[in-house]
Structures are given as C-alpha cells and as structure tokens.
Image (cartoon, rainbow, N blue to C red):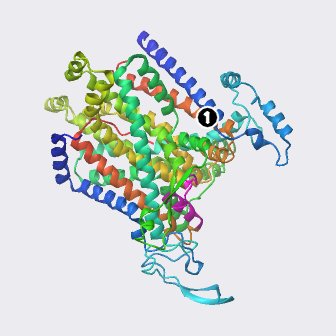
Amino acid sequence: MISDRTRTSLEREIRSNTVATIGVALLLSMLLMAVFAPVLAPHDPTDQDSSRNHQPPLFFGGEESETTRMIDGEIRTVTESNAGTLAHPLGTDSNGRDVLSRTIYGARTSIIVAFSAMAVSLVVGTTVGMVSGYYAGRTDSVLMRFVDIVLAFPALLITLAMIGILGNITVTVPDPLVASGLVSDRPTHAVIPVTITLAISSVVWVWIARVARGEAIAAKNEEYVMAARTMGMSNLGIIRKHVLPNSITPILVLATIQVASIIIIESSLSFLGFSGTTLSWGYDIAAGRDYLATSWWLSTVPGLFIVVTVVGINLLGDLLRDALDPGIQRGGL
Amino acid sequence: MKDELVFLGRRLAQGVVVVWGVVTTVFLFRVISPTNPAQLMAPDDATPELIQQIEQDLGLTEPVLNQYVYYLSGVLQGDLGFSYMTNTPVLRRIMFALPGTLELAAAALVFAVLASIPLGILSAMYRGSRIDSTSNLVSLGGVSTPNFWLAIMMVLLVSVQLGVLPTSGRPIGLVDALTLLVFQADPNGLTSWVAHMILPTIALGTYFMALLFRLTRNGVLEELGKEYVLAARGKGLPESLLMYRYVLRNSLTPVVTVTGLQLGGLIGGSVVVESVFAWPGLGTLFIRSLNVSDWPMMQGILILVGAGYVLTNITVDFVNAKLNPQVELA
C-alpha cells in the first residue's frame, strides 16, 4: 500500500530526525505497556490494602507519623514512616492500590479506545469521503451538509450527548495473557468501553471524511482514472482500484495525528466518569483530586503518562507530515 | 459592495440550513434516547396512569412528526422547552449559565492570542535560536496536555503548595464586578473576578495558544521565504515596515480561520475545565443534565452552541476576505 518512494523518504526522515525517533520510541513503549500489562504490572491493579495506603513514590516522603491501625482486632497507635518503597515505586492510592500497576493497566483503556475508535472512523469516514468526492453533485452536497452539522458541535459535547443516548455499554473480555496461564494474580478480564468508543467515532469519522473527500476529488481528475472510465470500469471498481490507493497515505497520516485528539477526549470522558471502567488514566486523575493536598502523586502520575503518549503521537505525526507533506492541516478538539 | 452582500447572503443561507440540521439532529437525539422523561419526572411511587398522564402532558404520545413540528416552531420563537428536572424554562437557565462560559472562553482566547502570536513571530524571525527551540518545546507540551490535568497540576502547585489564588468557583461575574467598581468605587469585586479567572483561563487557553503559536510560526516562515520579501529587502524597505505591512498581514489568514474554528473547541474544552474549577457555566450545566437525562436542557445547550459556531464561522470568513483581498468572496 505504501510506495517505495514513500518508504525511502520515510526512512530518510527517521534517520535524520532524532526528536521524532524519540517520539516513536515513547509511543512504542506505551503500546507494549498496554499489550503486556499483566506481565509488566508488579501488582494486581485492583488489589486493595488499607494498611499501605497513601504511600508516596520512591525517594519521596520519609516523615514518621503516628496513626491508628486495626492490628489483630485491636485498635493501636503505631508510629509509621511513609517513605516510598521499591515495592510501590510510584506510590499507592487511597485504597492502597499500586499506582504503577494501575497506570500500566490504564494504558490499555486509552490504547483500545484509540485504536477501535480510529478503525471505525477510518472505515466510515473513508467510505463517505470517497463516495462524496468521487460522485460529486447532489450526493456530495447532501453528505457534506451532514458533515457541517456534526462539525457545528464541539467534539466533546457531541460525544457526551452520544453517551446520553447509548447509555453505558461495556464488553468484558478474558485477558488472554491471564487466561493462558502466563501470569496469575491479575484481573482475569479486561473491560472494553464500547460507549465512549462509539461516541468518539461519531465525531472523528467526519475529520477523516473531509480529507478523504479532498483526496478523491484530486485523484478522480487524474488521467489514469479517466482512462479507466473510458475502458468501461465501474465507478466502484475505479474507487477501489485507483482512487482509494492513491488517497490512502494522507488519510492515514491524518488518522495518526488524530489519535492524539482521541486519547485526550477519551481521558476527558474517563475523568468525567463516563468510561465505564475504573482502570483508566482519566479515572485515576479524577480520583486523586480528593487527595491533592496530601498525596500529590495520585493525579500527577497518570497525567504524565497521557502527556508522554500524546507527545509521542504528535512527534510521529510531525515526522510523517514532513516526510510525506500531504499538505494537510491539523484538526482540533 | 454588491459582491459582499451576495457573499454574505449565500453564506447566511448555508448557515440557516446547517442550523436547521443542528436543531433536527438534536431533536432526534431526544427521540432515540432510551430514557422516558415521564418516568424521571414522576414520583417513585407513581401509578402507571400518572406516568401516562405526564407523557400526555409532555406531548410524548403525539406522533413523532407532530412533536418535531412543535419543537421546531418553539425553537424558532426562542422557546427551548422546559427542564425535565426543575420544570423551569431551558432558555432562562442557559442564559444564567452562559456568562460564566463566555467570559472563560473569551479570556482563554485573549490569553492564547496575546501569548502565541508575538512568540510565533519571534520564533520565525530568529529561527533556530534559543527562543525558537524553547517555544517549540512548550507548544509541543501545550498541544499534548489534557486541559483538566493541567488545571489540576496548577491547583496543586499554585493553590495547594503556594497558597495563592482560589481553586474553585465564580463568586462574581464581570458585569457585576464592573458595576461595583464604577458605581460604588469598590475594586474588590474586580479583584475577586480576576483571581478566580486566572487558573481556569490558563487551563483552557494553553492548548489553543500552542496551536496558534505553531500556525503563526509556520505562516511567517513560509511568507519570509517568498520572493517579494527578498525584493523588498533588496530595495531597502525598512524591516519593520516589511514585517507589519506585508508579512504579518499575509501570514495571519490561517490564524484567523483557526481562531474561528477553535471557538467551538474552547466551548467544548470548557466543559471539563469548568468541572475541575466548579465553575457555574454551560459545561457544568450540561454534565449535570446528562447525569439525570434532562434532554431539553442538553438540547438547548447544543442548539445554542451549534448556532453560535455557525455564526462565528460566517463572521470569520468575512473578516478573512476583508483582511486578505486574495481570498475571494465565493
């Protein structure tokens, strides 16, 4: 699907651009983290233990304080040091759950939503854009008015409205790594937030459709398309054989860049409590707000992971854009 | 002049079609949503007869097409219906929340424009300098940071650690603050307004600032590479005149366009920022309505924001055409 020339220019760009390479590396590590979460997470992310709650990250804390604890059925006052430990390098939350493990698992939610929402949007958006651009005329104006209507709403408001319509749909699937017996003591099932995936797709397909349409218009006036038409090739055949393959690169570049927006929308929805799963970066940031004054790391850590992921995507997007220069503009939230 | 009127007329006609589409979409949202408002409004121990009575009062037993006609004609007369929860007129409630969001969005816009455009110009003029690389790094961070997390981090740093600036609420609106200042010579209202605005404004405006910075920098760089710049320099045109009269003017077109396009984004972004700062605006109202399936309220907000966006974009196109004669009025 990618031509040799494209590949050469991509390779040249990657070799000459260290910053972008860093971006790709960041992104890859996030992907690996999401896929292998059960193996990489040092603890069960849902394992609660109030005797070790609010532990600060490694190298932080260290003050001794007196607290009351239930020990052997008795309430006793004990002196405890709250120094961070290697067992919980990024600290623990208000229920004593390991922040590092929760953050590693949180990557899964963001990555699953980002990939599936983008897949849905690519299929719908490319189809609509191709049809609209190729057939032009009335089909085009009807479809594009529809696109205008969707664009008139802020993306976040329309995803929220879709959540109101769809309710809270989640699909629980067995975690393959746990099911295969590779690791135990980890959650056996993963929650896929279907509602927010669909809600996000309901906006993102429009961004794809606009670019796909532009590409289809440009491609359809090329000589080889006219030749194919003269030879009696069907319209759908032309779209599939000629227009789509020649438009796909810029569409995929835009899709890569827009994954950044999807992750930010996803984390916003999770933050507002609509993701339907408690293992997500946005959810943990929201939960940490109640303890800002005492446990700063709770909201800080998951947010840093969001920023790193999105920086990675943006650097990759810049790289692709410089390499292929399809002349596209960044969309927005 | 005639061209301009034709242009405005055509854009407005297109805009009307889109706004009609917005109203229709929003109506359909309510129709396909699974909640039964009668169930929501009725007391817990309501009999089926009572629920049916409420459905009838709400007009929900009518055919959908009739409901649509009622809704559309209501909207045309500025009647957005009544809240399912409080039974107050939706429009009144929205008008009450609107200033909070508008003040925030406007402040974020001003902050973003004032910070990004000068920096973008400097970065482009001194390409590769320390100013340029620092600004690029900051803008990469800006477009990559979710606004709600930035908000929380600022609260953590500024309010919790340093103990300055309030963390939430909007005790006084701008109009009241100014009234207090002008008629009673009391500056406390305005001080409080400013103090409560600072963190939400930065949280909401940063992404936008980073975006505008990139656009400005790229626009100016592209413009500086054009031949007329070389020619103008060659004939000894003062650099400042060249920059202000020609380069900036030509490179700001995409900046104006994106500013217009992003206004919707600012309103959308303010949903989350408002929730962090317990800010009484449209976003807070929308989330609260969503949690109780108060569709008339959500519909009203969506229509208002959608129509506002369409109008803004027509204005932006017009401003652009005025600013840059190369953009045709078509």
Answer yes or no: is residue B213 visible: no
Q: In this image, A217 relative to B62: left or right?
A: left
**Residue range (magenta):** A271-290
Image location (x, y in percent) of residue B289: 67, 44
Residue position marked by numbered label 1 in the rendering: B29
Q: Residue at x 68, y 26 (%)?
A: B64
- Secondary element at tag 1: helix
Kind of residue sitting beneath label 1: Phe
Q: In this image, B170 relative to A175: left or right?
A: right
Label 1 neighbour load within 10 Å: few <14, some 14-19, many 20+: some
Which of the pair B210/B239 is nearer the observer? Answer: B210
Q: Residue at x 32, y 37 (%)?
A: A251
Q: Is residue B85 above or below residue B5?
A: below
Q: Is residue B146 above or below residue B11?
A: below
Which of the pair B295/B105 is nearer the observer? Answer: B295
Q: Residue at x 43, y 74 (%)?
A: A42
Image location (x, y in percent) of residue B195: 57, 54
Image location (x, y in percent) of residue B220: 27, 37
